[in-house]
Image: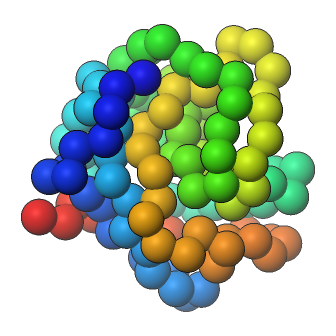
């Protein structure tokens, strides 16, 4: 999935608070950076994650089944996911896009939220 790059960070802003994330070093994360800044409507899914649809699909890369609290992922090719709990997904798995370095528990509440993603240098 690629290691994290200290140079590629994003800010995730919402009415519930802001967090930063370090992006993974992979083609999908680099493609996500090219779409920024973007605003996404996120909905709660299974009381473990917030999901929203990206404007354009990201490249397909190796996937994995396990995720940690704070993982940024991609389900399919255009469903951006912020996991606020640890767990496991079914096959074909998720693409790892990065890891939140702030308090991801701000998203641990029911209901939708509007988030804004932008690059941080």
Query: Can you say which quadrant of the picture contains the C terminus?
Result: bottom left
* Residue appearing at x 70%, y 23% in the figure: 65
Whether residue 66 is visible, yes or no, is yes
x, y percent for residue 71: 56, 48
Q: Is residue 107 above or below residue 58?
A: below
* Total count of labels: 0
Q: Is residue 68 above or below residue 75?
A: below
* Residue appearing at x 63%, y 60% in the figure: 42
Colouring = rainbow
Query: Can you say which quadrant of the picture contains the N terminus?
Result: top left
Whether residue 49 is visible, yes or no, is no
* Residue appearing at x 33%, y 33% in the figure: 3
Q: Residue 60's image quarter?
A: top left
Q: Is residue 120 above or below residue 92?
A: below
* Residue appearing at x 52%, y 85% in the figure: 17
x, y percent for residue 108: 75, 71
Taking the image as shown, residue 26 lies to the left or right of residue 101, namely: left
Q: Residue furthest right?
A: 46
x, y percent for residue 58: 39, 26
Taking the image as shown, residue 52 lies to the left or right of residue 90, namely: left
Residue in the foreground of this view, choosing between 117 and 62: 62
Residue in the foreground of this view, choosing between 32 and 19: 19
Q: Residue 120's image quarter?
A: bottom left
Taking the image as shown, residue 66 lies to the left or right of residue 6, namely: right
């Amino acid at each position: 999935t690629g290691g994290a790059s200290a140079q590629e960070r994003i800010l995730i802003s919402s009415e519930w608070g802001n967090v930063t994330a370090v992006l993974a070093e992979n083609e999908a994360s680099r493609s996500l950076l090219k779409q920024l800044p973007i605003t996404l409507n996120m909905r709660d899914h299974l009381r473990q994650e917030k999901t929203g649809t990206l404007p354009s699909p990201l490249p397909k890369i190796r996937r994995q089944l396990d995720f940690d609290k704070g993982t940024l992922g991609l389900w399919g090719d255009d469903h951006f996911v912020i996991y606020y709990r640890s767990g496991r997904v079914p096959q074909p798995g998720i693409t790892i896009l990065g890891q939140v370095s702030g308090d991801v528990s701000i998203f641990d509440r029911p209901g939708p939220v509007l988030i804004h993603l932008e690059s941080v240098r």
